[in-house]
Image (tube, grey):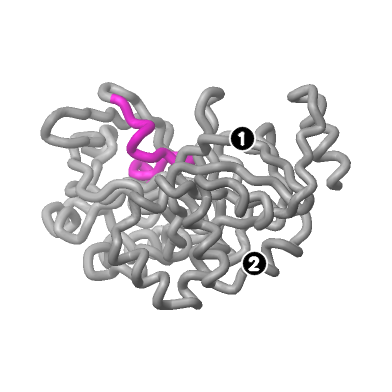
Amino acid sequence: MWREVVTVCLVLTGVACLDKRNIVEYLSHQTEYSTLVSLVSQAGLVDTLSNIKFATVFAPTNAAFATVPTATLDSLRNNTQLLRRVLLNHVTNHSLISPQLQDNERYDNLIGGSFIFKNDGNTITVNGVKISGTDTIVANGVIHTIDGVLLPPEGDIVTYLAKHDDKFSDLFAAIVVAGLDGTLKGGVFTLFAPNDKAFNAVIGSIPTDQTKLADLLKYHVVSGSVFSNELKDGQKVSTLTGQQLTVSISNNGVKIGGATVVQADINTNSGVIHEIDGVLIPPSTS
């Protein structure tokens, strides 16, 4: 397996690009990863990342950690179990070089979550975070540099909605009644999620027929993960009904199909959620 990875790297770059140090040894000698190395040591993961075989690490730089609120970093440093979980959320036991990081490709990480990639041919992101350096191949794995810290999501799309029933109870119930919960758990999607206030405003217009309800909800779902930094003014995105939603971006914020995005980029193991303040009614049923 490792020979195959090095061979591919040789074909793509013209050099064998294999550093004989292990993951921790390599990171420890690069000053831009000093915060990561310090946290790895504090979490007791030095042996784990030194001895793991065929792993891939998405390594946040010091600048990436600097964007994390101080209170969040302090809470991680004071909670070893949580710190280990966050750090292992950056690691997979698959050897992944950049040609494998295809658009909407999905791989499991070491805490049972998912890495979901976006690749437009110029920029690659993982769970919405830019990969700024690729394919450092070391003795026991591959290291890719990232510009942000990957905090663990709260399960898949449906699980997130269920946990946050203070504002998504109506949407969660509708998804279950329509029989779409299995679909949204099993693939990679973008959900424009109306909050409970949005549902209450149009409660009389929500269909009770299961098929029509499913069509209404599918009008809020796009195949693949689409983060806010990928949206452009006037952009059309195709929903699971085959109909399109129009994106509007102005100084007043981002709108999708006329509804305002209240909270963007809620990352989950099955895609991304954008909370919106309105229920989107498909043209055929308006």
Residue range corresponding to the magenta coloring: 218-232
The reply to whether residue 216 is in sight is: no
Alpha-carbon distance for marks 2 and 1?
30 Å
Secondary structure of the residue carrying numbered label 1: loop
The three-letter amino acid code for the residue at tag 1 is Gln
Residue designated by label 1: 102
Which of the numbered marks, if any, corresponds to residue 110?
none
Q: Is residue 245 left or right of residue 138?
A: left
* Residue found at x 79% / y 22%: 14
Q: Image quadrant of residue 3?
A: top right
Secondary structure of the residue carrying numbered label 2: helix
* Residue found at x 27% / y 67%: 169
Q: Is residue 177 left or right of residue 13?
A: left
Residue designated by label 2: 46
**Residue 19: percent from left, percent from top:** 76, 43
In this view, 159 is above or below 67: below
Find out whether residue 225 is within the magenta segment.
yes
* Crowd tier of the residue under label 1, counting other residues whose Cα lies within 10 Å: few below 14, some 14–19, many 20 or above: some
Q: Is residue 89 left or right of residue 11?
A: left
The reply to whether residue 250 is in sight is: yes
The answer to which of 206 and 146 lies nearer the viewer is 146
The answer to which of 252 and 74 lies nearer the viewer is 74
Marks 2,1: beta carbons within 8 A:
no
